[in-house]
Image (tube, helix red, strand yellow):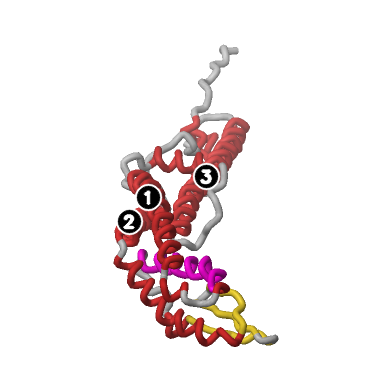
Amino acid sequence: MGKRIRKPPIKSEQRRDWLKRNEENGESPPNIAKHDLFDVRTVRKQIELAKQERENREAKSFVLRNAMESHYNDLRNYAEKLNTQISGKDKTPLSPDEEFIEAALHEHLPRSPIWDYLRKKQSLAKTEAEQLANTRNLIEQMVKTDCQLNSLFIEINKLFPDIADALEFQAKQWSHGKEGINVKDYLLSEPDGYGFVNLRYGGYPMRRIDSDHADKYLEILREVLPKLESQLKQSEAYQELEKTAGELDRLNRKLREELAVIRLRRIVPGRCKFCPL
């Protein structure tokens, strides 16, 4: 009896070929074994092994695809978070993980202008806060030294903080190109009974005033508020604030455009240490 020659191990390419012939061409394992000169048990075993290898590849591909989608979603959600904060629709702070997501996005897009825009935005926001504080100081001084306001009864001193708050609101609105409020439509008096009237300028309540003096207060406020607003707009403090706010608005528009590319393209080029591959 001749010595049996052991055939070399079956390569993956061959078992994938057998699987294809079996599934797509309908060739049975006995026919494959007869044609390729292999034991039918070997053919069946290798076809089953090829199926397992295919399932493993598909499972890995599915997991990888989901991981990549989740990774891209993390980057896109971070861009969306920044976008909503810039547009003023979201005031919630970034979560701790978003620090790492920002680093990941920076690795993906190291040359993006986003990073320079964010640095400039931080600097401008600091400058704007300082200029707004200077504007507030000017407003308080204007209100306290106004002759017409000081001609009122001593109780009008209670109005000083409220008038200053309203004028500060106006400065914020104007500096960003918004209309603000006006005396004609927003300076209101609302009787609350018991001989008192509530004065209000837009969303700013100006305390309770006794009804006997309400008309006089309103008459003077209708003259004083437009005058103070005009002085405020012409002041150096406000004009510096307006310039900075304009720069900040233009920068925010550029930043939102760059963030839109990330949000809407859905796939972020480049790689980072958090990439699944």
Three-letter residue code for mark 3: Glu
- Alpha-carbon distance for marks 1 and 2? 7 Å
Dot 3 crowding, Cα within 10 Å, few <14, some 14–19, many 20+ = some
- Image position, residue 85 (x, y; %): 47, 57
**For the point 49% across and 66% down, which residue is it?**
165
How far apart marks 3 and 1 lie (CA) works out to 26 Å
Describe the element under mark 3 as helix, strand or loop. Answer: helix
> Disc 1 marks which residue?
127
According to the picture, the residue beneath numbered tag 2 turns out to be 244
Q: Main secondary structure of the magenta part?
A: helix
Q: Quadrant of the N terminus?
A: top right
Residue 219, horizontal then vertical, whole percent? 46, 85
What is the crowding at mark 2: few (fewer than 14 residues within 10 Å), some, or many (at least 20)? Answer: many
N-term mark: 2 or 3: 3
Residue nearest the observer in this picture, 37 or 216? 216
The disc labelled 1 sits on which kind of residue? Thr
Does 217 sit left or right of 49 as displayed?
left
Labels 3 and 1: the sequence-earlier one: 3
Please say if the residues under marks 1 and 2 sit with CB atoms less than 8 Å apart: yes
x then y, percent, for residue 220: 45, 81
Q: Quadrant of residue 46?
A: top right
Q: Secondary structure at mark 1?
A: helix
Q: Which residues are magenta?
A: 156-175
Task: State the mark number for residue 98.
Answer: 3
